[in-house]
Amino acid sequence: MGFGFACHKTRCTVCTQTSIQLSYKSLFAQISQLKSVARTIDLQVQLDQLQGMLQTTEARFLGILNDVNTQCCPKPVDDTLQSCLASVDALVPYATTMTQHIPGDVPRLLILARDALLPTVTIDVLGRPAQAARVDNLDDLAGAIAGVMQQLNDIVGAPAECDSMYGAYVTTIHQIRLALCHLGHALDAVTGRSPLSMNIPHNQPLPDRLYTLLQGTLWSTLHSAEVPSSAWFMCKKFFFVKNESEASAEMFGDGCMRSQLYHGRLIAHVRSESDTVIKRWVRLPPVLSVHHGENCCVFIGTIDGIYAAGCNRQGQLGVGVVSQVVSSPKKVMLPRDSDIGRCKCYQTPKPWMKAKLQFWHGSGVNFLLTPCSLMAAGDNRFGRLGVGSSEGMVSRFMRVSVPLKCVISVTTRSFPITVVRQCRACFVSGRNDYGQLSLGHTDEVLSATKLPFPVDSVIMSQTSSAMLSDGKVIVSGNNQFRLFPVNADVVVTPTALQFPWPVSRIMLDQAVMFAERGDGRWYARGSNALGQLGVGLGDEHIVRWSHVPLAQINQIHSDRKGTIYFDTSTGMYIAGAVTSDHAVCSPTMIPAPMAGLPPALDEWVLACAED
């Protein structure tokens, strides 16, 4: 929607020109009327002369006004607007890169200004190269924005009395003023003059007034006030927050602890005595992530650190105390000697600058991986946490000394042993009374210790272990039930097994071992006091590989009390103690247990096992 005059001065000359033309037209009409009633030739001649003089005067006036118009605005407004629009469009990618770490959404403000200017030009200039100043830093960006504002301010300011005569001009001036408003806010944000109404650090005072109620603030406030459902329809903003939160809020946890995260605000779902769910706002700094673990514990990552709540009988929450339950989130105590406090990702309030936290939860223990270190807290019997301490419980997170070179995985179970794997390096700690940690001795291991050979897969039970290393199965630990084909009650030195046939899968428990032959046939050895191996023999110990008459076994589950379940493609089978006074030594088909199966045995696939 362009217009052809150049500025408010030109607009005055146009008004004057129109007024003169109307006045002369009126005079010419009066002269024509007088000539029609003139009775003498002399009078008509005089009227003709008067009309000629007026025409000459009109031409002179119009010529003078055209000269003034040309001198006032040598450059059309359309060109200026096109230049400003192209400049603002070119500044958007610079602002996106340079303003990530300052409060305020500068790129969006520039986009709004660009959209406001777009209807004021007659041609498409977006995407064209703009002749703008070089933008290398925030000062250059501020200068470029100020330059565009100066050009737009030169256009605005026309006399109000002429507005009614030029509707297109008035509409364009409105769009320009709207663009100036957005550019002004963007300039204030870039130069640091904008009053904060969001992302205010928790240790700074709030401003005298809040200019914006954020969606997360409204959402958490209304839930905390327990407003009736009809309150969400009081205004468009409430209704928008209701619909948007239902679509995008994240749900975490299940069972005893559930929570909902939306725009940095966390709502806990609390079940009342009447079995109804009440939503409570958890008062914390802006929340970035939520991690639910075993035994009803939860870790909450915020811009001000990590908070935890839930079961804390072993001090596994790392909040500095040991208690049955931590009902309100407390701040996690991180190591003082750790460099986590100096990590940049924990000092910025920007969520997109945060590195993700990773947790591993076990029975009474929690491991936390940050970009700076691996840490652990909780049950430390036998030194299982690998933090170098002999204390039975560690109530503050302590560093686990492993290098952070590649992806880490942590395995921790109900028994006091921890395995940390990093690429093909394996670190172990904890109980080692049978040499099950494969270190060649039986001493407790208080610090995470690297195994002397590369490890591709690990199966760790409470008293024995099996490692896959370069295609070989290396075992160690308690062997009194002869689950390993080694003639020793305790295998302290890590020993590579020799199988009588190619092996494709291994499953291991502390007293039994299963192996799948390359052709799909299964074999077992180890403790068999109740016939639980399913090999059809009643011997207390099976010291040779014996065939299990089942095919296509998917999982093997053991209750470690003399009962083993075989989950096959044809159904569920049981061997060992079926009831308290009845046992079977051959697999017997049963319906799946209604109360759920016991844990499955650990397993791994041997990609290239030796014969």
Image: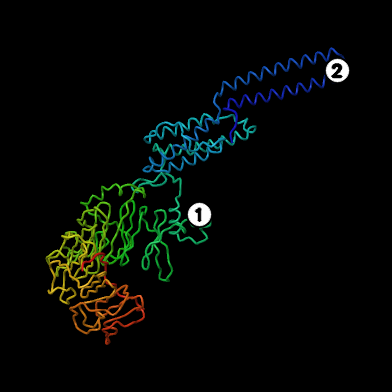
| Outermost residue toward the right in this view | 39
* x and y percentages locating residue 275 in the rendered image: 42, 71
Q: Is residue 326 above or below residue 44?
A: below
Question: Horizontally, is 510 left or right of 173 in the view?
Answer: left
Asked whether 147 or 568 is in front, the reply is 568
* x and y percentages locating residue 129 in the rendered image: 46, 34
Disc 2 from disc 1: Cα separation = 79 Å
| Outermost residue toward the bottom in this view | 581
Q: Is residue 453 above or below residue 207?
A: below
Q: Please tell me how crowded label 2 is: few (under 14), some (14-19), or many (20+) other residues with Cα within 10 Å.
A: some
Residue in the picture at 62% in, 24% down: 13
Residue at disc 1, secondary structure: helix
* x and y percentages locating residue 606 in the rendered image: 25, 66
Q: Residue flagged by tag 2: what amino acid is it?
A: Ala
Quadrant in the picture for residue 292: bottom left
Q: Earlier in the sequence, mark 2 or mark 1?
A: 2
Residue 166 shows which numbered tag?
none
Question: Horizontally, is 193 left or right of 449 in the view?
Answer: right
Quadrant in the picture for residue 397: bottom left
Q: Residue flagged by tag 1: what amino acid is it?
A: Phe
**From the image, which quarter does the N terminus lie in?**
top right
Q: Is residue 91 visible?
A: yes
Q: Is residue 416 visible?
A: no
Q: Which residue is mark 1?
A: 240
Q: Is residue 437 above or below residue 572?
A: above
**From the image, which quarter does the C terminus lie in?**
bottom left
Q: Which residue is mark 2?
A: 38
Asked whether 117 or 585 is in front, the reply is 585
Q: Please tell me how crowded label 1 is: few (under 14), some (14-19), or many (20+) other residues with Cα within 10 Å.
A: some
Residue at disc 2, secondary structure: loop
